[in-house]
Amino acid sequence: MALGFFSRLKAGLTRSTTKLTTGITDTFTKRKLDDFALEELEELLIAADLGPTVAAKVIRAFRRARFGQDVSPPEIRAALADEIAKILAPVAQPLTIDETKQPFVILMVGVNGTGKTTTIGKLAQIYADAGQKPMLVAGDTFRAAAVEQLQIWGNRAHAPVVIGAQDADPAGLAFDAMTRAEREGAKILLIDTAGRLHNKAALMEELRKIIRVIKKRDPTAPHAILLTLDATTGQNALTQVKTFKDMVDLTGLIVTKLDGSARAGVVVALAESTGLPIHAVGVGEQAADLRPFDATEFARALTGADPV
Amino acid sequence: MFDALSGKLGDVFDRLRRRGALSETDVIEAMRDIRLALLEADVALPVVRDFISKVRLQAVGTEVLRAVSPGQQVVKIVNDALVEALGGEGVVPLNLNAAAPIPFLMVGLQGSGKTTTSGKIALYLKDKQRKKVLLASLDTQRPAAQLQLAQLAERAGVASLPIIAGETPVQIARRAMDTGRREVFDVVILDTAGRLSIDEALMDEVKAIRAATDPAETLLVVDAMTGQDAVATATAFNEAVSITGIVMTRLDGDARGGAALSMRAITGAPIKLMGMGEKLDALEQFHPERIASRILGMGDIVSLVEKASENVDQANAEKLAKKMAKGKFDLEDYGEQLKQITKMGSLSGIMGMLPGVGKIKQQLADADLDTSILKRQGAIISSMTKAERANPDIMKASRKKRVAAGSGTSVQEVNRLLKQFDMMKDMMKRASKLGQKGLARGGLGALMPQGGGRRPF
Ligand SMILES: Nc1nc2c(ncn2[C@@H]2O[C@H](COP(=O)(O)OP(=O)(O)OP(=O)(O)O)[C@@H](O)[C@H]2O)c(=O)[nH]1
Ligand SMILES: Nc1nc2c(ncn2[C@@H]2O[C@H](COP(=O)(O)OP(=O)(O)OP(=O)(O)O)[C@@H](O)[C@H]2O)c(=O)[nH]1
Ligand SMILES: [Mg+2]
Ligand SMILES: [Mg+2]
């Protein structure tokens, strides 16, 4: 992987964890790990969006191993990172393309503004560079200029973009796109969808319909249903992911906007509760700003521990 | 939205109430639960700390321990503290006290809802304040961002600044203000690109925009789902551009919305508006006391009713959409709708028993009045035969008389219902043309005649 990868991810996460790190330093310099210290540590985890329950759980594990010991800040950070990496390791899985499926159909779903369209643009670039002939589908026929936004991403990656009329039925559009992809020999079909809140039943049903219609063309498709999760999202991410998972059989997550100050600690809770693979992280607005998700790196950056 | 938190706090207070008189230990224990509930609701940690210590100070001691009804006393203390933290009582309107053209600057993180909210505010100012509004996109970053705003402007029926490729955001801002002066606009809304609070170059850029335009409102647009990052975002934007107001978007979701508390506490700026959907009319005033009482589970009756109505809309939208697609909406369906609505009317009775709802009792009484009309219509429909419901055109004088007698109403009322139903069918046809998609988004609201006054409940 290019050198820019970790340094860029780390740069974002480091900035974001300055406070957490400082906190730990303040708390633990020349101190015993006592109840008070543990409580402060727990709050620091909560401030990273781990949520009170998961934070408490991590601290319990810590207490068993370390209570009463003299600990230095680097030790604390490393141990904490290990604890978190252990939870994340099983879900750190790259998105693999099954080349026997042609086109390999990827459906991008998620709440409004989380980065679906941008992530499709980034994936299109990666697949185009790899000679995998991606085709894009402007399945968001609702939001203003959503089609044009995807078209610009398609142009950047020199990938064709299938479009329909404003307010056209996205399911019908997806079906037509499948036909076209087969005809034109596209290997990967990336379908964009309109943003939708998980608590809107009608919109979730619309999504199910898109999938039903895709299956008419290829019963094994969509081969991946990915949800983009905004790193700034707090505990609502749990309901969000669970509902999408129940409604449309999500196959994986992509965490976006990790270049900001948000730490996305809720991912830890998600790994535990859903076990859904986390394929990649978004670390910027440009085509090149998509990275594989690495559990150790993420956990170390989150806790401010030094890279391995 | 805040329901889950309400439930949580509701539990806490139920326990307190059952115990009667409070010991200090009780208060401390309750505060521990409240702390957890607030954290689970995404209120930022420093804000939670502040809040808890403030409330504990007030709660521990005579005030609570000697109160006649200790549980209610604690509720009152916590509620007051929440209201205060959310910004005291009452609505803070958008500031229009400046020389025209009045600049509004929209700022926030990527994807928080700035562009959509710009369109919503434009529509609101045009329709409700009779202002001439110019929308200008300073977003040269995101693909098709300027086009997005131009399309929204068209939908809202307001002007948008012509797009000139290659201009910098500051240049666009200047041109927008020039155009605003020259073409005599009342308000110029400057939509900016999303930016991270840690992106120094882009934060400098928005500072420069602010300096060049001196906005009357600098609105920070924030996603209601925001977690602990609310602290960093609020602090950075406030330091850079001095926020004058906050807009919380996606409050139509089910996030507990603790970010509202955090944002307000950190910036000191009032939360002015709430985004309640993707459509341009889905914008509401922010009511701190309403949200606070909702957090406490003591029943914010007004928004509860609103929410319930939304649910009815949503559930029925699909069924209706199917019927309409087949051109088959009949009186049977209408009767069904009425039943749902009257069911909600009866909610008012239950809510009236909740504490602290004195001032809305009158509104509830009004609601009951309207509900009774709906009940009568329901009675008319149930007095009709299946054939009549399916095909109201066969309703001649004799049938009308029979139905009026059967339902205890008058022929006039039967006529009124039939006429109303005809109008409704018309609307259905129109909605059909809008497409199922539009219906699913807007729910029944999209079917209501524009300017058709208030809903019947
Ligand atoms: N900094 C940063 N910004 C991102 C990232 N991913 C997306 N964005 C920005 O987030 C905003 C929203 O992204 P979109 O791709 O339009 O999101 P979406 O989910 O398609 O939005 P809707 O279709 O409106 O629901 C844009 O300004 C993107 O440039 C990321 O990884 N980092
Ligand atoms: N459900 C719901 N969706 C909203 C609301 N406000 C905005 N949205 C949606 O959120 C998404 C992003 O909105 P935008 O207005 O493009 O956000 P933005 O802040 O301008 O995004 P950038 O310019 O990329 O930073 C769109 O899909 C909007 O339709 C709201 O109150 N409720
Ligand atoms: Mg999109
Ligand atoms: Mg925008």
Image (tube, rainbow, N blue to C red):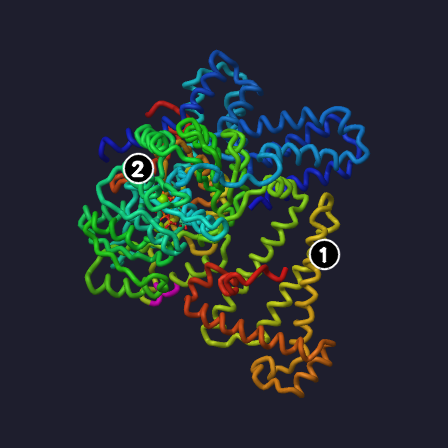
Task: Give percent across and percent down for residue B183.
Answer: 34, 46
> Which picture quadrant has residue B410?
bottom right
Q: Quadrant of ligand 4?
A: top left
**Helix, strand or loop for disc 1:** helix
Provide the chain ID for the residue under circle 1.
B
Residue A215 in magenta?
yes
Task: Give percent across and percent down for residue B223.
Answer: 46, 41
Specify whether tag 1 is near ligand 2 (CB below 8 Å): no
- Report the magenta residues as a range: A212-216
Which one is nearer the viewer's eye here, B46 or A25? Answer: B46
According to the picture, the residue beneath numbered tag 1 turns out to be B365
**Helix, strand or loop for disc 2:** helix
Residue at 70%, 36% in the rendered image? B75
Against A280, residue A162 (above or below) is below
Residue at 60%, 42% in the rendered image? B291
Task: Give percent across and percent down for residue A269.
Answer: 48, 39
